[in-house]
Image (cartoon, grey):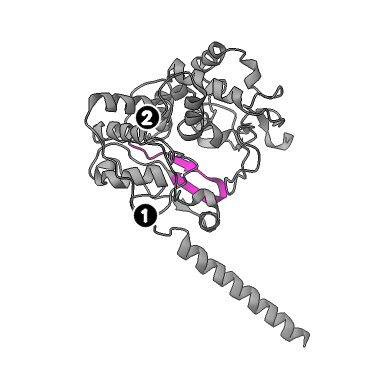
Amino acid sequence: MLKKILLSVLALIAIAVIGFYIFVQSSYDKTYDWPGPSLKASTDSTTIARGKYLVNGPAHCNACHVSSFAEIVDSDKGLEVPLKGGIKFPMGPLGNMYTQNLTSDAKTGLGRYTDEQIFRMMRHGIRPNGHASMPLLMPFWKMADDDLVAVVSYLRSLAPVENAVPPNKWTFMGKAVRSLSSTFKPIENPDAPAVAPPMAATIERGEYLARYVTNCVGCHTQRDMMTYEATGPEFAGGMEFEPWVDLHKFLKADTTTWLRTPNITPDPGGVLVKFKTAEEFIARFKQGRAYSFSPMDWGAFSRMSDEDLTAIWMFLNSLQPVKHDVGMIAFMKEEK
């Protein structure tokens, strides 16, 4: 009798495991056929100039869509680097992601795709092949229509650079997380504005940037590092970044040092209170990196306008203070 019960339990476990395996393999790259927004790229020089500012500044596309560590460093310094993609981002036990070629190349870049496919990617987080991306890393679903048009118009204007980027490589754990976690799902009804708040020192402009362009909220919120879902209050910091060993070695930096994001609400225990004025806040951004391997794209943000940096400072100071002691910014994992 006991043997039959054990065999039945084992059979149920086997069925559950096989069922979960089939579910993951069939759903991690589910295809979505949602239409994209009815927007068109422009050849207007003013629109393209606005897109260049966004791509190389607030939206910091130039910080990731390059092909080598040397180009990451050059881009951080403000040098012109082709946005041909190819950098491999290690995602720990989930696998590896590769940044895409954003040049106008017709074989390997954005030249392969229609405006609708590109706008759908940015607005809904759906790749041209219909698979979901990871919207948390590119939080442009509520970027205003006019800014989206400016960004795509600028990217369309870039000289083509042929560079075939490998597909993302997911482990089974990565596929399971993609199947189950909301951070890997498309954004269905983003309700984005038609027009962005004008570039001016206002709280409205600051919130728009911090949430949907610069993505301060993405990193300065504590997250589960397996699913990337928020586990702490917004803007209160605590997200941990494991050493990117290959990049650390390239930069001749310590490969055992982790970083965690600080609390940027106006709580006395956070870092925002260090900057009593907008001018002090701007000066810190113009200063650049404190850590060579910081995941924050200091180079791109240092080239933002004073109005935009002031707007972010104003918005952050308008937040409700959140008491959240994140500990040391730079630390060894065993110290936690």
Residue wearing tag 1: 34
Q: Label for residue 177? A: none
Any magenta on residue 132?
no
In the image, residue 101 lies at what x, y percent?
33, 40
In the image, residue 197 lies at what x, y percent?
42, 27
Specify the segment rendered in magenta: 83-97
* Left or right placement of residue 38 versus residue 223 in this view: left
Residue wearing tag 2: 55
Of the pair 296 and 196, the residue shown nearer to us: 196
Of the pair 243 and 19, the residue shown nearer to us: 19
* Left or right placement of residue 41 versus residue 202 in this view: left
Any magenta on residue 87?
yes
Q: Quadrant of residue 85?
A: top left
Q: Quadrant of residue 73?
A: top left
- Residue 165 can be seen, yes or no: no
Q: Amino acid at mark 1?
A: Trp
